[in-house]
Image (spheres, rainbow, N blue to C red):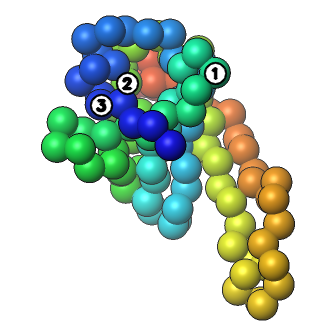
Amino acid sequence: MSTVTIDDLHDRRPEIEVLCLRSLDPDLYLVEVLIGGERLRVTGSDGKSLTARSQLAAKRPFKGLPVMRAVVRHESSYDEMVGQPGRAGNAMEVTISRPDDDLS
């Protein structure tokens, strides 16, 4: 998967079709974006993946950017935990408020 820095997003200001917060743990989110049909992992200027401990903290760097839709995606690892092969398409995706629509 390709990457893009948060600084580059602020510089170029592309239309972000989907801001995706991948729920990896109850309190850990990895940030991805969909731009021009391409899914990109968002990194900081240090090259490390942009992660956050809350949805609000994950969306904060995107305030002021043209985000069309924001979602939280959780992929269950239950099948692997009970010794079954993983299933494709077991992700639960929920639409959440866009960064500019948050009242915080």
Q: Quadrant of residue 34?
A: top right
The residue singled out by tag 3 in the image is 5
Image coordinates of residue 37 in percent, x first then y, are 63, 21
Q: Are marks 3 and 2 in contact (CB under 8 Å)?
A: no
Residue type at mark 3 is Thr
Q: Are marks 2 and 1 in contact (CB under 8 Å)?
A: no
Q: CA distance from mark 1 to mark 3?
A: 17 Å
Image coordinates of residue 73 in percent, x first then y, are 64, 48
Furthest residue to the front? 2
**Disc 3, SS:** strand
Q: Are marks 1 and 3 in contact (CB under 8 Å)?
A: no
Q: CA distance from mark 2 to mark 1?
A: 19 Å
Q: CA distance from mark 3 to mark 2?
A: 12 Å
Furthest residue to the bottom? 83
Confirm whether residue 84 shows in the render.
yes
Pick whichever of labels 2 and 1 is earlier in the sequence.
Answer: 1
Q: Tell me which residue sits at (23%, 24%) in the image.
A: 7
Q: Tell me which residue sits at (44%, 10%) in the image.
A: 14
Pick whichever of labels 1 and 3 is earlier in the sequence.
Answer: 3
Q: Is residue 43 left or right of residue 34?
A: left
Q: Is residue 64 left or right of residue 7?
A: right
The residue singled out by tag 1 in the image is 37
Which of the labelled discs sits on residue 62, or is there none? Answer: 2
Q: Quadrant of residue 57?
A: top left
Q: Tell me which residue sits at (31%, 40%) in the image.
A: 43
Label 2 crowd bin: few (<14), some (14–19), many (20+), radius 10 Å:
some
